[in-house]
Amino acid sequence: MILFYIRSSSVQTYKWCPRKYYLSLWIGLSEGPARKNTDLGTICHAILEVMAIFKLAKQNKQNTFTHEILGVQPY
């Protein structure tokens, strides 16, 4: 592995558990409350996106709206 920078937290993580260091800093996996907060934010943004698409369809007097994950949805 080639390191481009060194942080004290990275060194401490590596000392505590080299596998955790590799998984979190090189692979990008995370754990704990930060992950839960990220997931909650993603869910909230998805809900707001669907609500905005729904409102736009309603303003345009359409009977359905289309979302990339949900597909075509009547209302």
Image (cartoon, rainbow, N blue to C red):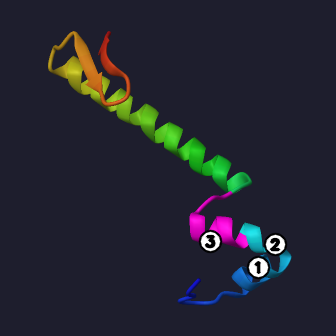
Span colored in magenta: 21-30
- Residue annotated with mark 2: 17
The residue at 37%/23% (across/down) is 70
**Badge 2 element:** loop
Q: In x, y percent, where is residue 65?
A: 26, 19
Counting other residues with Cα less than 10 Å from the Cα at mark 3, is it few (<14), some (14-19), or many (20 or more)?
some
Image quadrant holding the N terminus, namely: bottom right
- Dot 2 and dot 1 residues touching (CB under 8 Å): yes
Give the Cα distance between marks 3 and 1: 10 Å
Give the Cα distance between marks 2 and 3: 12 Å
The residue at 72%/87% (across/down) is 8
Q: Which mark is residue 23?
A: none
Residue 30: image quadrant is bottom right
- Residue annotated with mark 3: 25
The extreme left residue here reads 60
Residue 48: image quadrant is top left
**Badge 1 element:** helix
First in sequence: mark 3 vs mark 1: 1
The extreme front residue here reads 1
Say above or below: 42 vs 30: above
Q: Which mark is residue 14?
A: 1
Which kind of residue does numbered mark 2 sit on? Cys
The main secondary structure of the magenta stretch is helix
Q: In x, y percent, where is residue 60?
A: 14, 20
Which kind of residue does numbered mark 3 sit on? Leu
Say above or below: 29 vs 46: below
Say above or below: 50 vs 40: above
